[in-house]
């Protein structure tokens, strides 16, 4: 398994791309918690800090496709540096404003919105560059799997760094300074990594129509968008309900083990996905994985204890990174070279928007319905995405019969088949 990933990283330019992306995207793991802690410290209000953090995330998610479109139009070398410089300056402004009490709350809100507006779309840019470096489907799938797993780990490492900085220095605003340094360094390195790349080919007539009528492309990518939104909603709901579960069992701190199990399962599933040789097309794989995620989330409703909930979370996690990776890959196939960054940003927006909606809805239901029923309902968004997959399959030219003939045993071949027989609210930008 490891050799296939080593081969990917040995591709000329791949290690440089991967390293730059890791540095820059670590900022997005550090900044949210640092911002929450810093604003809480300076205002003395968790409610104000929560609203500000939510406003930052919302402005970030809503404008991510716009920023990604600028990257598609002007290229990473021209678009990323000004975005990263502006974002880093605003983060430094937030650090200065939260260093001690006294800055008016509306000024903090304005800075948070500005940060969300300027945050560079490093995830979509990285995946678009993987597609340029690795035109063959199998190496590209392994690269996407590695990228998704690394991103999952960054969203575990980042909050830990933010917490350590806040606890060790008593200045959570220093986490914002670190976030500014990381995003600026990583973005500039990522822009430099594409120097010497040939200019993108002139779009054909179909691509030109997609650029002039972007909703055509969104309609064509409805299955991966629905899968990402369903996964985000289910995981967002489960994250909040796991906290409620732990509190009602008198083990509030134990929710960390549930989150860790989910992350570990996601990393494992992502690495396995990249190592197997798949026969089924991305459309079929995505439908199977989305259904598996929904089924695994439904099983959490049967867990009577926190350890069993963690075990069920690990099982669900096995499908998280594979589902997201396949959604990105399928979108990449449908979008074409000149719209990959923009289309990938919409997958991010769908996942994050679904996560916010799922968390909010779970919060409303948790006090009104039995917890086991709420956990079962967390599976509904992912399962509902299957209806979109079915509709997309029915309209795919010449694909319906072939898709129906693919069985679970036929999804992988060769070494992957033998392995299978023997044998994952963030703001992602």
Image (tube, helix red, strand yellow):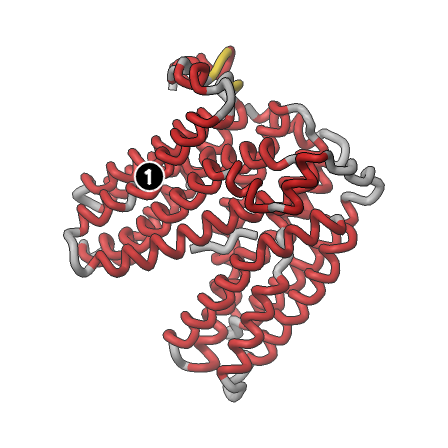
Give 250 or 141, whichever is nearer the viewer: 141
Identify the residue at the far bottom of this view: 102
Q: Give residue 5's position: percent from left, percent from top.
A: 61, 28
281 to 48, vertically: above or below: above
Give 374 or 215, whichever is nearer the viewer: 215
> Which corner quadrant of the image does residue 406 belong to?
top left
Q: Circle 1 — which element?
A: helix
Which image quarter holds the N terminus? top right
> Which corner quadrant of the image does residue 88 belong to?
bottom right
The residue shown at (43%, 39%) is: 227
Q: Can residue 165 be seen in this view?
A: yes
Q: Give residue 351's position: percent from left, percent from top.
A: 46, 48
Identify the residue at the far right of this view: 196
Q: Name the residue under label 1.
A: 384
110 relative to 296 in the view: left or right = right
The residue shown at (49%, 62%) is: 57
The residue shown at (77%, 44%) is: 193
371 to 92, vertically: above or below: above
The residue shown at (65%, 65%) is: 87
Q: Give residue 271's position: percent from left, percent from top.
A: 51, 31
Crowdedness near tag 1: few (<14), some (14–19) or many (≥20) residues, C-alpha within 10 Å: some
Q: Can residue 129 be seen in this view?
A: no
129 to 256, vertically: above or below: above
Give 130 or 17, whichever is nearer the viewer: 130
């Amino acid at each position: 398994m490891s050799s296939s990933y080593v081969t990917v990283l040995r591709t000329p330019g791949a290690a440089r791309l991967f390293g730059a992306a890791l540095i820059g995207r670590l900022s997005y793991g550090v900044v949210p918690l640092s911002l929450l802690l810093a604003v809480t410290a300076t205002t003395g209000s968790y409610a104000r800090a929560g609203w500000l953090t939510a406003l930052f995330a919302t402005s970030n998610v809503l404008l991510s496709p716009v920023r990604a479109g600028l990257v598609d139009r002007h290229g990473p070398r021209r678009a990323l540096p000004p975005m990263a410089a502006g974002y880093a300056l605003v983060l430094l402004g937030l650090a200065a404003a939260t260093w001690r009490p006294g800055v008016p709350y509306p000024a903090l809100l304005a800075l948070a919105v500005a940060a969300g507006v300027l945050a560079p779309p490093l995830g979509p840019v990285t995946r678009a560059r993987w597609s340029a470096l690795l035109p063959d489907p199998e190496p590209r799938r392994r690269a996407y799997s590695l990228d998704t797993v690394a991103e999952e780990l960054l969203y575990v490492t980042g909050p830990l760094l933010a917490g350590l900085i806040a606890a060790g220095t008593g200045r959570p605003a220093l986490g914002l300074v670190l976030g500014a340094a990381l995003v600026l360094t990583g973005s500039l390195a990522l822009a430099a990594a594409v120097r010497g790349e040939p200019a993108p080919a002139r779009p054909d007539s179909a691509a030109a129509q997609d650029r002039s009528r972007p909703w055509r492309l969104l309609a064509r990518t409805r299955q991966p968008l629905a899968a990402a939104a369903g996964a985000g909603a289910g995981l967002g709901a489960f994250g909040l309900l796991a906290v409620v579960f732990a509190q009602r069992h008198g083990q509030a701190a134990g929710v960390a083990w549930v989150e860790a199990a989910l992350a570990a399962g996601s990393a494992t599933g992502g690495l396995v996905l990249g190592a197997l040789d798949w026969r089924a097309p991305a459309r079929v794989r995505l439908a199977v994985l989305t259904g598996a995620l929904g089924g695994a989330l439904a099983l959490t409703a049967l867990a009577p204890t926190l350890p069993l909930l963690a075990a069920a979370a690990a099982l669900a996690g096995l499908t998280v990174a594979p589902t997201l990776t396949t959604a990105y890959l399928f979108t990449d196939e449908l979008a074409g070279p000149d719209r990959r960054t923009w289309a990938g940003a919409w997958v991010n927006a769908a996942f994050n928007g679904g996560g916010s909606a799922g968390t909010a809805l779970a919060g409303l239901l948790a006090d009104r319905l039995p917890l086991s029923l709420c956990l079962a309902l967390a599976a509904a968004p992912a399962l509902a995405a299957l209806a979109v997959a079915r509709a997309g399959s029915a309209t795919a030219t010449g694909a319906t019969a072939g898709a129906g003939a693919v069985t679970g045993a036929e999804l992988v071949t060769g070494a992957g088949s033998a392995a299978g027989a023997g044998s994952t609210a963030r703001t992602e930008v």
